Image (spheres, rainbow, N blue to C red):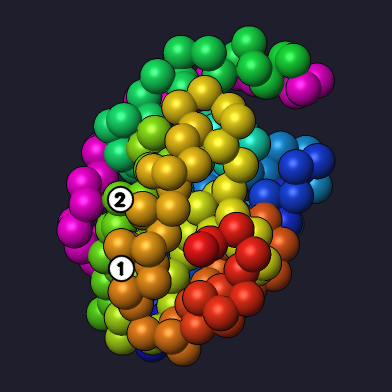
Amino acid sequence: MIQLERFTFNTFMVNTYVLYDETKEAVIVDAACYEPFEKQGLADFIADSGLKIVRHLNTHCHIDHILGSLFVAGKYGVRPEFHKAGLPFLTEAKTIAQTFGYSFDGLPEPGGFLEDGDLINFGNSSLRVLYTPGHADGSVCFYCEADGFVITGDVLFRDTVGRTDLPSGDFELLMESIKTKLFTLPEDTVVYPGHSGETTIGYEMVNNPFIK
């Protein structure tokens, strides 16, 4: 059974997730740690829990979600994996970071590219990749059928959805992604988003005012 630990990092309040099971193999989703104390907090949890980080997964490549990529690569030897459609965001990452007042030392080379339907295996557990563009090209979600949860990045939140006014944003495409990839999951599936607290698929199907 997967255990999930959530950290909230940087001024954008991004959720970074550490997922692990009884084998102690673990994956990091969206390493967003920026400040030294954030990096130390993440590293302390991993060390204290006796975890072995085997993969680093990105829901998408917006700057707020990738600020800790270089730290994680250097510390644990795992390079970020994401959908290939997210590559264009990396060419402007340093400029965008500086726009928001962040210093940025660059990114490691990708560890691999994720495709819709891929299985991410670690320990005795697995996540399925769901390609869900609309907020940004390359946006993916990570679904665990066995444990009944999905990590949605900036696609779906409690009572709202990802913004679509940034480059490659497309509201109609976002609605299609949500309806065909997320709203086909069981209603009791827990949603762990890229910002703020969790919700469920069933709650959003009934209550989310942006989805008609």
Q: Please give the range of residues in magenta.
A: 100-122
**Rendered image quadrant of residue 138:** top left
Per the image, label 2 sits on a secondary structure element best described as: strand
**Residue type, label 1:** Leu
Q: Secondary structure at mark 1?
A: strand
The reply to whether discs 2 and 1 touch (Cβ–Cβ < 8 Å) is: no
Work out whether residue 32 or residue 21 is closer to the camera in this orientation and state it: 32
Q: Which residue is mark 2?
A: 131
Question: In terms of depth relative to the viewer, which is nearer, 171 or 141?
Answer: 171
Which secondary structure class fits the magenta region best? Answer: loop
- Kindly identify the residue that appears in the image at 25 percent across and 38 percent down: 112
The image shows residue 179 at horizontal and vertical percentages of 37, 63
In which quarter of the view is residue 204 placed? bottom right
In the picture of the structure, the residue carrying the numbered disc 1 is: 127
Q: Nearer the viewer, mark 2 or mark 1?
A: 2
- At label 1, counting other C-alpha atoms closer than 10 Å, the crowd grade (few under 14, some 14-19, many 20 or more) is many
Image side of residue 141 versus residue 3, left or right: left
The percent position of residue 202, horizontal first and vertical second, equals 50, 83
